[in-house]
Image (spheres, grey):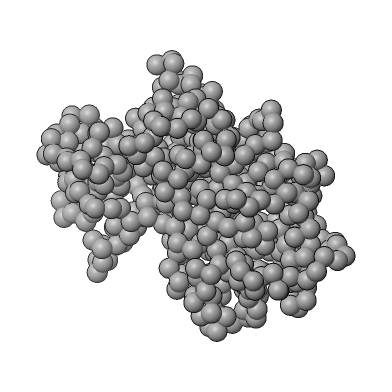
């Protein structure tokens, strides 16, 4: 099935059910299908042809979703543009990925005008919210036959840049089908689900919304995803499914009204994109119920490479011998193969650490105009993720850290995630990041940057002593620094490279 086929299947089976709900407005599946045909015809009128990329630059908005489906129906790959990025970064994305048309929201109208003036090849645009969009759409008329096949590109996301310069990624219809198959084989619903789009639809939250279309899922868009509005929406909308980065879950748990709402509708609260504190994971299960599920993926192989299901969490909490699984990201989906590989290309066995590699239908077709990177990441027939990990005897995958995040201190390898798990346990800590800073004696000094909960205080010397007792002298931080806030990407990931860069400037070696 192609990307657009999942919407059409949903309309065939659940035509009168709400596909999108935004505040007091809603669109049924039949209405959304009709709208997608009108958008496709409007793109054709603008002169776009199959294969011409279309960019969508908007916060979570129902017409942003409609534009995705209209572009797909016209055979135009769509480029998700995150409103939380800086304007210069987004202009570079549009240029790098060859956008021909731009859908934009009024909140970024000035930036969209710059894009139309400065980005070569960008020939047309339309504002999604307001009368302009209604005037741009043709009247209801003939349907548009989608011209794409299984191996045609349908989606052009951009890597986050947490591990280097951002790159455009080519996903084809066949890959989206495999992603949906992985998700639906693992996540089960007795009735059509309701998913809350609180995290940006340009990232994993958008992928999860796609997986629910053929099951008649309703996507509830939330434009200002502050902790309280999410907690309120779960009860009000009877939400069954939502995806959140760990940092947002931490903020929800810390909110003074977290105990005021009914969360009984929840089936899956999915977290991913970064490791989650085991202590906060325990707290979240106590508050929200046995509904926590972790996903592991990357832009090049989205969202369901590995999955730690709710029952895996429950078993790990109930059985001390399985407690370590709480820091696992689960087992591979049924349509994905994951391996652990050493630097020589040898696949490793249980308990051995190496780079996580994968292959299967969800893996990208390649980068945009970047054959050198394609050759590097597809070495030996596997996609190389850049993550260091291991598997246990039962097949559970553990992401130890990013290869580039590993610290070499005094000749020993230190994986920040191990140190961060212990720091997260402290009741005053909201979030933390451990990096290696230049040091004449150690080469790199293990250093922790800590963000505190509102109103909390931290005795860094006391914490340093406790960590040294638990980790030993090599792994324990040489310094703990309290900061107002940690730098984060538009998707909520802590940007360790931004922390490191200010300390490694002007040196011969930069990690």
Residue at far front of view = 24
**Rendered view: 301 above or below 283:** below
Name the one closer to the observer, 475 or 75.
75
In this rendering, position of residue 144 left or right of residue 474: right
Task: Please tell me in which quadrant of the rendered image residue 127 appears.
Answer: bottom right
In this rendering, position of residue 163 left or right of residue 311: left
Q: Is residue 446 visible?
A: no
x and y, in percent, of residue 462 in the image? 13, 35
Instruction: Tell me which residue sits at (63%, 32%) in the image.
Output: 187
Instruction: Tell me which residue sits at (52%, 74%) in the image.
Output: 109
x and y, in percent, of residue 129 in the image? 60, 66
**Rendered view: 442 above or below 419:** below
Task: Please tell me in which quadrant of the rendered image residue 421 appears.
Answer: top left
x and y, in percent, of residue 35 in the image? 75, 60
Instruction: Tell me which residue sits at (45%, 21%) in the image.
Output: 316
Task: Please tell me in which quadrant of the rendered image residue 319 appears.
Answer: top left
In this rendering, position of residue 41 left or right of residue 362: right
**Rendered view: 450 above or below 260:** below
Instruction: Tell me which residue sits at (38%, 34%) in the image.
Output: 258
Q: Is residue 159 visible?
A: yes
Residue at far right of view = 142
Name the one closer to the observer, 123 or 226.
226
x and y, in percent, of residue 100 in the image? 65, 75
Count of numbered circles on the image: 0
Quarter occupied by the C terminus: bottom left
């Amino acid at each position: 099935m192609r990307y657009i086929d999942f919407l059409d299947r949903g309309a065939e089976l659940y035509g009168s059910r709400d596909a999108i709900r935004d505040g007091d407005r809603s669109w049924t599946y039949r209405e959304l299908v009709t709208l997608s045909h009108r958008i496709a015809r409007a793109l054709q009128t603008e002169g776009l042809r199959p294969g011409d990329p279309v960019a969508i630059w908007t916060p979570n908005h129902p017409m942003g979703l409609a534009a995705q489906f209209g572009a797909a129906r016209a055979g135009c790959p769509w480029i998700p543009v995150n409103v939380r990025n800086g304007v210069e970064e987004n202009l570079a994305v549009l240029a790098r990925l060859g956008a021909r048309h731009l859908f934009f929201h009024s909140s970024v109208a000035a930036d969209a005008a710059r894009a139309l003036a400065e980005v070569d090849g960008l020939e047309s645009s339309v504002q999604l919210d307001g009368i302009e969009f209604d005037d741009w759409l043709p009247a209801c008329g003939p349907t548009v036959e989608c011209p794409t096949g299984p191996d045609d590109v349908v989606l052009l996301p951009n890597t986050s840049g947490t591990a280097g310069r951002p790159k455009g990624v080519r996903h084809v219809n066949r890959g989206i089908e495999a992603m949906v198959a992985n998700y639906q084989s693992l996540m089960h619903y007795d009735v059509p689900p309701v998913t809350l789009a609180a995290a940006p639809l340009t990232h994993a939250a958008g992928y999860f919304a796609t997986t629910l279309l053929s099951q008649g899922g309703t996507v509830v868009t939330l434009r200002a995803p502050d902790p309280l509005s999410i907690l309120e929406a779960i009860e009000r909308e009877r939400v069954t499914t939502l995806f959140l980065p760990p940092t947002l879950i931490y903020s929800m748990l810390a909110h003074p009204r977290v105990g005021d709402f009914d969360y009984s509708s929840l089936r899956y609260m999915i977290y991913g994109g970064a490791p989650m504190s085991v202590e906060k994971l325990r707290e979240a299960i106590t508050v929200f119920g046995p509904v926590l599920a972790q996903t592991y993926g990357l832009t090049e192989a989205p969202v369901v490479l590995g999955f730690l299901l709710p029952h895996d969490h429950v078993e790990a909490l109930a059985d001390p011998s399985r407690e370590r699984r709480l820091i696992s990201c689960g087992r591979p989906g049924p349509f994905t193969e994951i391996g652990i590989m050493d630097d020589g290309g040898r696949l490793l066995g249980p308990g051995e650490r190496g780079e996580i590699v994968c292959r299967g239908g969800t893996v990208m077709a390649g980068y945009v105009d970047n054959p050198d990177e394609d050759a590097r990441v597809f070495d030996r027939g596997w996609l190389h993720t850049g993550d260091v990990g291991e598997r246990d005897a039962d097949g559970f995958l553990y992401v130890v850290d990013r290869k580039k995040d590993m610290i070499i201190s005094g000749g020993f390898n230190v994986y920040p995630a191990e140190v961060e798990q212990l720091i997260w346990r402290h009741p005053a800590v909201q979030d933390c990041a451990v990096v290696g800073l230049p040091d004449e004696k150690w080469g790199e000094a293990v250093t922790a940057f800590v963000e505190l909960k509102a109103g909390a205080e931290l005795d860094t010397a006391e914490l340093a002593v406790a960590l040294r007792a638990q980790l030993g002298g090599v792994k324990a931080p040489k310094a703990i620094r309290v900061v107002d806030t940690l730098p984060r990407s538009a998707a909520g990931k802590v940007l360790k490279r931004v922390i490191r860069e200010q300390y490694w400037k002007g040196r011969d070696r930069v990690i």
